[in-house]
Image: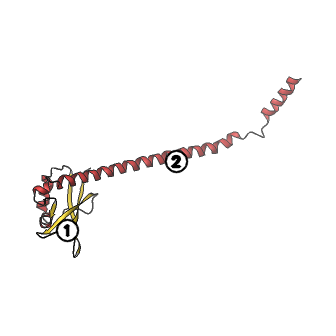
Amino acid sequence: MWREEMQNRLSSFINDNKGISEEFTSLPALAVVMIGFALFFAMIAGVYYQHNERVKSLDKYEMANFILEKLTSANGLLAEKGIIVGGTIDKKKFEGVGNSQDNIEAIIEESRIVGKEFGFKLVYWEEDGVQTIEWTNIPGDVDKVAASKQVAVRLNDAEIVLGVLTIIVWGAD
């Protein structure tokens, strides 16, 4: 008798259709979980992309800084040309080179920097205010990267002022 009663209860429990709704409630939960996974992977992909972009940007800046240091060192190309003498930029020579496309191309070729082009910009302070000399070869419509350093600028034989020399680099990546 006890066994028959258990079978009847179990049979009524199994055959009762009023409480069967689990399959329908698990689908929305599964959809929410899948949306969560998709958002997580989208965020990870975005972080990875941003990290790569920052690394590339840092590499470009380091390359520009390397070129700046190479050309402006005591035995660098600008020192060989007499533009930088004793760590001081001669304003007249710098301006003369920057205004002649032939002189700029000669310096770029003699620098032996392959695949990159560059130009210089010199900003210095006079009594009249801030003055800027920019080489004429710097394009306006390409991706560029710049690095700067403080320099002394010889205006004439009696006057030396503070300035900032910036190299602007562009070219094939």
Q: Nearer the viewer, residue 31 or 124?
A: 124
Q: Is residue 118 left or right of residue 32?
A: left
Look at the numbered disc 1 and give the secondary structure of its residue: strand
- Callout in the foreground (1, 2): 1
Residue at position x 74%, y 39% in the image: 20
Which label was assigned to residue 118? none
Q: Which residue is mark 2?
A: 39
Nearer to us in this view, 134 or 151: 151
Q: Amino acid at mark 1?
A: Val
Q: CA distance from mark 1 to mark 2?
A: 56 Å
Is 15 positioned to the left or the right of 77 in the image?
right
Q: Are dots 1 and 2 in contact, CB under 8 Å?
A: no
- Return the disc, 1 or 2, that comes first in the chain's sequence: 2
- Image point (23%, 51%), residue name: 66
Asked if 91 appears above or below 34 in the picture, the reply is: below
Which class describes the residues within 10 Å of circle 1: few (<14), some (14-19), or many (20+)?
some
Residue 101 x %, y %: 13, 62
Mark 2: few/some/many CA within 10 Å (<14, 14-19, 20+): few
Mark 1 sits on what residue? Answer: 161
Res 162 → quadrant: bottom left
